[in-house]
Structure formats: structure tokens, C-alpha cells
């Protein structure tokens, strides 16, 4: 199970702001806009161009179940990546991402000052550059281990070192025994 990758996906899922068009007319209008014309939509849905036009004008409102299902599928396929991309973009440029975790966290510091690993519950707002790094790494298909390292690094700099104002000699933060992990945009 990829806990970090799934966590990022879930955060983006929750951040969907606008629900996909529901009525057949609205769905048809959306597809016509996406595919730039009624002909392309008609071919994709295996119906006549005239039928597409009648849905667009709300002259037909209730599609047959098989057409309704195809319509729903095609709209979802295009809608979600668009909204996802917007949510990721916003997190990576302005809003940042919140990590809420209950895990064993410890860190490595110069000899004599190592903190004992212990279970901590942290809710930390990570700045946009970490959201950007997490989403980029996820898109490149890195391992969950690597996403975990990026998150640990983000916690090190944001939480433990408070953006460079303390614990400057901290070398590494370790994340183990994760009991709970959630991201929020």
C-alpha cells in the first residue's frame, strides 16, 4: 500500500471544488466544449450529431441508460484531471499542504543531542514548495519511501527547525511506524 501517494491523492480528491456537470444537457455542453464540436462528441458517444445538438439545447433531457453511463464516464474522465491539476497547482504555488500524522519520529543530530524516537502526533502546514516537491515526485512515480523522505525533510525544516530559526544542527528526521497519515489542501 502506498500510504503517502494515496494520502496525496485523497487530499486532492477532497479539494475538488466544483462538482462535475450532472444533467445530460450540461454534460453534453461540457463535452462539446472539451472536444471543440458536436461531431467529435457524436462519434465518441456513438450517437448522431443531431442528437448531441438536441441535448445541448435541452430538447432531450433523459438519455437511455447505456448513453447516460457513457456520458458520465466521458465527463468524469476529463473533469477530474482538470480539477486535480488545479488543486495541485494551487497547493504548489500559494496554499501549501497540511500533513497530519501520528508516527514515530526521531532525528539524528550531532553526538550527545539525539532525540529518542517517540510517537508524536503532528499537524503541520507545509509551505507550497513542499507541496510542489511531493506532487512532482508522485507524478514521476517515485516510491512511497521517497515520498516519505520528502515529507520527513519538510517536517525537519518546517516543524523541527522552524524555517531555520532553531535546531540548526539537525541532520535528519526519521519517520517510522506510521499509525495515521493524512494530507489536506
Image: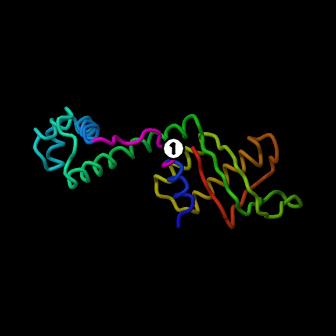
Q: Position of residue 6 (x, y in %)?
A: 52, 58
Q: Position of residue 51 (x, y in %)?
A: 13, 41
Q: Is residue 73 above or below residue 180?
A: above
- Of 149 and 58, the residue lying toward us: 58
- The residue at the far right in this view is 112
Q: Position of residue 159 (x, y in %)?
A: 74, 47
Q: Is residue 120 left or right of residue 49?
A: right
Q: Is residue 123 above or below residue 37?
A: below
The image quarter containing residue 113 is bottom right
- The residue carrying pointer 1 sits among few (fewer than 14), some (14 to 19) or many (20 or more) residues within 10 Å by Cα, namely some
Q: Is residue 147 left or right of residue 16?
A: right
- Of 57 and 15, the residue lying toward us: 57
Q: Is residue 20 left or right of residue 47?
A: right
Q: Residue at x 63, y 58 (%)?
A: 181
| Numbered label tally | 1
**Residue marked by disc 1:** 15
Q: Quadrant of the C terminus?
A: top right
Magenta residues span: 13-23
Is 76 magenta? The answer is: no
Q: Residue at x 29, y 52 (%)?
A: 73
Q: Residue at x 19, y 38 (%)?
A: 55
Q: Position of residue 130 (x, y in %)?
A: 60, 45
- Of 44 and 17, the residue lying toward us: 17
Is 20 magenta? The answer is: yes
**Secondary structure character of the magenta stretch overall:** loop
Amino acid at each position: 500500500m502506498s500510504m503517502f501517494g494515496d494520502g496525496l491523492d485523497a487530499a486532492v480528491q477532497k479539494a475538488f471544488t466544483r462538482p462535475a456537470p450532472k444533467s445530460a444537457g450540461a454534460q453534453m455542453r461540457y463535452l462539446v466544449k472539451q472536444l471543440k464540436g458536436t461531431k467529435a462528441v457524436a462519434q465518441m458517444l456513438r450517437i448522431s450529431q443531431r442528437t448531441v445538438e438536441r441535448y445541448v439545447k435541452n430538447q432531450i433531457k433523459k438519455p437511455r441508460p447505456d448513453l447516460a453511463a457513457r456520458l458520465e464516464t466521458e465527463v468524469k474522465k476529463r473533469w477530474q484531471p482538470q480539477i486535480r491539476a488545479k488543486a495541485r497547482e494551487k497547493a504548489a504555488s500559494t496554499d501549501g499542504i497540511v500533513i497530519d500524522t501520528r508516527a514515530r519520529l526521531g532525528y539524528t543530530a550531532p553526538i550527545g543531542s539525539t532525540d529518542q524516537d517517540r510517537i508524536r502526533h503532528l499537524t503541520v502546514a507545509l509551505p507550497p514548495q513542499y507541496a510542489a516537491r511531493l506532487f512532482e515526485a508522485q507524478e514521476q512515480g517515485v516510491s512511497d519511501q521517497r515520498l516519505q523522505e520528502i515529507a520527513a525533510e519538510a517536517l525537519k525544516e518546517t516543524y523541527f527547525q522552524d524555517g531555520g530559526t532553531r535546531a540548526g544542527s539537525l541532520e535528519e528526521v526519521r519517520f517510522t511506524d506510521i499509525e495515521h497519515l493524512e494530507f489536506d489542501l
